[in-house]
Image (tube, grey):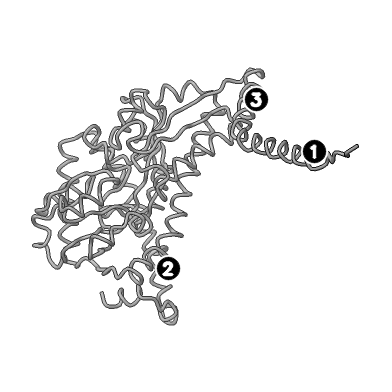
Amino acid sequence: MKTINWYPPVILGLLALLVLTFGALVVSRSDQEQTVTEIKSAALKNAGQQIFEWKLVTTWPKNFPGLGSAPERFARKVEAMSNGRLKIKVFGAGELVPAMGVFGAVSSGAAQVGHGAAYYWKGKVPAAQFFTAVPFGLNAQEMNGWLHYGGGLELWEELYAPFDLLPMAGGSTGVQMAGWFNKEINSVEDLKGLKMRIPGLGGEVLNRAGGTAVTIPGGELYTALQTGVIDATEWVGPYNDLAFGFHQIAKYYYYPGWHEPGSILEIIVNKTAFEKLPADLQAIVRTAARDANQDMLDEYTARNNRALKELVEEHGVELRKLPDDVIAHLKAINSQIMQQTAARDPQFNRVYKAFREFESQVIPYHRISEEAYYKTRNIGERTNECGSILTELNQKN
């Protein structure tokens, strides 16, 4: 009688079963993760705790470095600190609403929270521009001081209250760059006829100087500059500008960012939705906003220097300083605009006075603290130790 060897078929069968089991585990991994989430949600519901689900819309491309990562961080922090009781889904510009539709979407309740910049809404609230940046005004450190300890946030909340919105500082870029240009700026005359993407009060200054300011969402800037729709653009600074690839289509990179010395981004929350949250979740939202605000400034401080070095040394970008007479001309125009707007707009005037009062206190102190230290840091050997192309450029300028 012939003996049948069962081992090979059995082994093959076991191997096949193992492969199928492993494959099922891999395929079902996302299902398992979803199941865990559902179990957690069910546990919270069984414990009598309500689950809230919010939508967050932004003016930035989703997950864009710095600007786009801040709302993502905010959403993660809120969910983690609330143990999943408040979940926030983030939508980039154009995914749910257009980039410039954030204010309206959150005001109407179509989304519960938004992330953008207050100066984009100057058509609705002219005084909102103070809460992003004022040309030749406060830097990031000073802006945060004004908002959180100088009465600025309370004024901001008053401005947005008629729109059922609650504003919070949601990030800062620090001092920005003056922008990318396809022609040199050697005098005030070179500003005349210049079509430039520059929003807010800085845009009004450019208009008075003889240029034409336009507001274009970040995602459209590269094409607009490449095709000649605009002659120049400011965006943020080296970290973001490198990511957008502006060095591929513009030759000159100018500084300093006179128009945005300490740009604050905003997290706006639908007030009705916020008031439906229990007190602990309201506190978590505010705390997560403060975290996102500081984290963005930290990120730009760490990333801008490396990006600028790459732009200049690897991509051959010509870094230029705006001439002093051009800066002086723009500053004079800015003063006129601020005073004239304050004279005809009581709301603008109220915020302007509060802003100037804080400015008059903080700037004199910073002259003997921050500014004095910067000068001290550059004395003697320290300057020689820097030895970078940026130092050389500063010496030339």
Calculate the distance from the C-alpha at mark 2 to the C-alpha at mark 3.
55 Å
Q: Tell me the element at label 2.
A: helix
Mark seen at residue 10: 1
Give the mark toward the camera: 2 or 3: 3
Calculate the distance from the C-alpha at mark 3 to the C-alpha at mark 1.
39 Å
Image spot of residue 31 (x, y percent): 60, 30
For label 3, the residue is: 39
Q: Give the residue displayed 8% in from the left and 62% down from the top.
A: 189
Give the mark toward the camera: 1 or 2: 1
Labels 3 and 1: the sequence-earlier one: 1
| Residue at the extreme right | 1
- Is disc 2 in contact with disc 3, using a CB cutoff of under 8 Å? no
Q: Amino acid at mark 1?
A: Val
Calculate the distance from the C-alpha at mark 1 to the C-alpha at mark 2.
79 Å
Quadrant of the image occupied by residue 127 = top left
**Quarter holding the C terminus?**
bottom left
- Is disc 1 in contact with disc 2, using a CB cutoff of under 8 Å? no
For label 2, the residue is: 373
